[in-house]
Amino acid sequence: MQNLLCVSVLLPSLKKIDDNRSELSNYDINKLVAAFLKYVKVDEEWYCNAYPDVKESIEQGKVESARDHYIPAGFLEGRLPHELKVDEEWYLQAYPDVKQGIADGTVESAQAHYAGKGYLEGRLAYQPNLDDDWYVKTYPGAAQGLRSNKYRSALEHYLKVGFFLGYEPSPPEP
């Protein structure tokens, strides 16, 4: 109860619905997201090159920097704060539809796919450090999915399910 009181001072719209649910205004959600985004590294040069409209806004004095754009707007618009290097070989193995798109000529490269829409779809740029045994023991749904042949590997389960549920790919460092 004390934690809820402390949070409700910072986020006045917080209302407890029941033991499992709370309600929060969009304004307070945006404040909360912005508080976390303060710690995200924004590559000013890359961001301006990737998003010419932001560069133009900076030049016109509408926004002070790429960072000042990213925190209140860029994140919500689905923009990346900096370039993420894609492991091309792994990405094409993990996402056969992208490999097919390259073969068909509809996708330029794994890097281009990821930067264009792959990250918005929740795809990973490189293989996570997945401890298969630990993962399957820790998450019973993964073990069940493997036993039922719904997933061919712990990695496939992580990519399609675990990542989106916030599962850790390996045990935390001691």
Image (cartoon, rainbow, N blue to C red):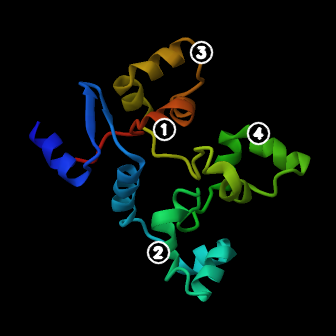
Q: Which residue is mark 2?
A: 68
Distance of label 4 from label 1 (alpha carbons): 19 Å
SS at badge 3 = loop
Q: Amino acid at mark 4?
A: Asp
- From the top left corner, tell me how far across and down residue 154 is, in percent: 51, 29
The numbered mark, 1 or 2, whose residue comes first in the sequence reads 2
The numbered mark, 4 or 2, whose residue comes first in the sequence reads 2
Q: Which residue is mark 1?
A: 163
SS at badge 2 = helix
- From the top left corner, tell me how far across and down residue 168 is, in percent: 39, 39
Distance of label 3 from label 2 (alpha carbons): 47 Å
The numbered mark, 3 or 2, whose residue comes first in the sequence reads 2
Distance of label 3 from label 4 (alpha carbons): 21 Å
Indicate left or right for 50 with 44 as reference: right
| Residue neighbourhood size for the residue with mark 3, other residues' Cα within 10 Å, grouped as few (<14), some (14–19), many (≥20) | few
Q: Which mark is residue 149?
A: 3
Q: Which is more foreground, mark 1 or mark 3?
A: 1
121 or 20, which is in the foreground? 20
* Residue 108 found in image quarter: bottom right
43 or 102, which is in the foreground? 43
